[in-house]
Amino acid sequence: MKKVLTSIVLLLFALLPFRAYASEGAQEGKELNIPEIVLEHLADSYEWHIATYEGKSIHISLPVIIRSSQTKDWYICTVENLPEGFFINPEHHNKIYEKMADGTVERPLDLSITKVVAEILIVVAILLTVFCSCARWYRKRDEITEAPKGFVGAMEMLVMYILDEVVKPALGEKHYRKYAGYLLSIFFFILVTNLMGLLPVLPGGVNVTGNINITLSLAVFTMIVINVFGNREYWKEVFWPEVPMFLKFPVPLMPLIEFFGILTKPFALMIRLFANMMAGHAVMLSFTCVIFLGWTMGTGFGVGLNIFSVIMLLFMNALELLVAFVQAYVFTMLSAVFIGLAHKEHHQEQEA
């Protein structure tokens, strides 16, 4: 308990220099806009913001790759030197738009490396490095006579846990090898992106799984795997389920419900991951902003508010570490269950 209190006190002293910054901003009439700060962090961007020092933004400009809707020409640049006719439209989430000859504006084909895309590339590089190093260990040693230790041993334990507790029970011995690679890739991708999002400094701090486009893509991949590799019994259960005849003829009530379920499964995966990760980031950022807000309220009230904010921030960070694993686990588990339901003979053999 003493160590926890000491850490909180030291953190408050570390934040003392920001009191002058907050007071200066209040004297200049600048109010701390917490919703704007939170939404700006959660949104995607063409630059990687690091910090703001003396009113100047310290950031890394990312490559902008766009194709003109008017001339069909390709441009590679940064957001600071956009070609003539292109501009950042604040009314449409700060995306790049093009002004046409007739005065209208259109969204060009945009293949830019945004902050989220850059973070995904970093996560992919991390995963390739980790698993290539583990594979190198297994190539050079006999895993039967020599057990892996350290980091390789921890990775093997995590992989075997997902295989034995998630993939095999959902898919069975007959099918689990076919889908193990996909499910493990999904698990580690979500886990690493969640953990990277908790880092407050470069190369972390990007809310990848709190972006609806990313969770939609992951859910669509699972939907494709389910419906492309589903067997005949699965499709029979969709269009001609084993229910009383009046529920499927002449009005195909149950087939419509089952067909609608094809869309609701990936939708549930998408919303569950997106909502949980976005909410967690929003709450942590809000408590961080309250720390700065406290300095503008005077020393007495400000210190008390900051102590409460720091305690809640530490609690939320610890909780988000758990959520990072739980959300990766739940997404992988539900994907495995949905894929297993597309192979009905496995369940029939178990019942027999």
Image: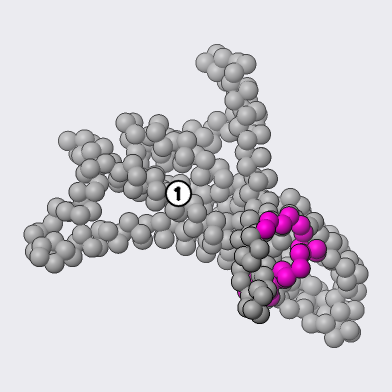
Vertical order, 106 against 215 (above or below): below
Can residue 102 be seen?
Answer: yes
Residue at figure coordinates x 36%, y 61% from the top left: 264
Residue at figure coordinates x 85%, y 86% from the top left: 29
| Amino acid at pointer 1 | Phe
Residue at figure coordinates x 45%, y 54% from the top left: 219
Vertical order, 126 against 306 (above or below): above
Q: How many neighbours does mark 1 have within 10 angstroms: few (below 14), some (14-19), or many (20 or more)?
A: some
Residue at figure coordinates x 56%, y 49% from the top left: 190
In the image, 99 versus 32, the foreground residue is 99
Can residue 43 be seen?
Answer: no
Q: Is residue 341 magenta?
A: no
Which x, y percent locates residue 336?
39, 44
Which x, y percent locates residue 4?
74, 56
**Residue bounds of the magenta highlight:** 73-94
Circle 1 is placed at which residue position? 221
Q: The C terminus lies in which quarter of the figure?
A: top left
